[in-house]
Image (cartoon, grey):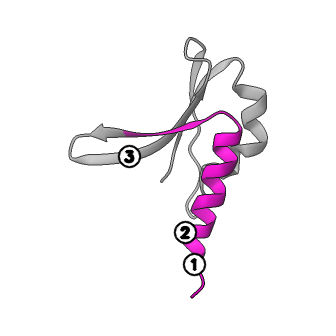
């Protein structure tokens, strides 16, 4: 049986983000739990990058290298 496509995409996204120094976290917002990717410089300027409908945090892979040295990055998985 072949793995589900959505799981394959999620796995590839997670690997790519980890390779760029981000880590997965879960943030509690009331009764909700939001999965986010965090990375960059904790004392840097905070940046939250929101992807569009149907996209993933991988949308920002090309930008992460340019931002992570100066910014505290948060990428929610919507």
Q: Nearer the viewer, residue 55 or 1?
A: 1
User: Circles 2 and 1: CB distance less than 8 Å?
Assistant: yes
**Crowd rating for badge 2 (residues with CA inside 10 Å; few <14, some 14–19, many 20+):** few
Residue 3: image location, x then y, percent: 57, 78
User: Could one spot residue 55 in this view of the protein?
Assistant: no
Q: Residue at x 55, y 61 (%)?
A: 53
Queried whether the magenta region covers residue 73, the answer comes back as no
Quarter of the rendering containing residue 38: top right
Q: Which residue is tagged 3?
A: 34
**Crowd rating for badge 1 (residues with CA inside 10 Å; few <14, some 14–19, many 20+):** few
Q: Which residue is tagged 1?
A: 3
Q: Nearer the viewer, residue 4 or 72?
A: 4
Q: Residue at x 57, y 88 (%)?
A: 1
* Furthest residue in direction left, as rendered: 31
How many numbered discs? Answer: 3
Please state if 50 lies on the left or on the right of 28 as rendered. right
Q: From the viewer's perspective, is residue 17 above or below residue 13? A: above
């Amino acid at each position: 049986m072949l793995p589900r496509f959505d799981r394959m995409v999620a796995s590839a996204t997670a690997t790519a983000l980890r390779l760029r120094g981000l880590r997965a976290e879960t943030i509690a917002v009331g009764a909700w739990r939001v999965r986010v990717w965090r990375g960059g410089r904790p004392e840097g300027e905070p940046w939250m990058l929101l992807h569009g409908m149907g996209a993933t945090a991988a949308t920002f892979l090309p930008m992460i290298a340019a931002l992570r040295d100066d910014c505290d990055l948060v990428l929610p998985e919507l």
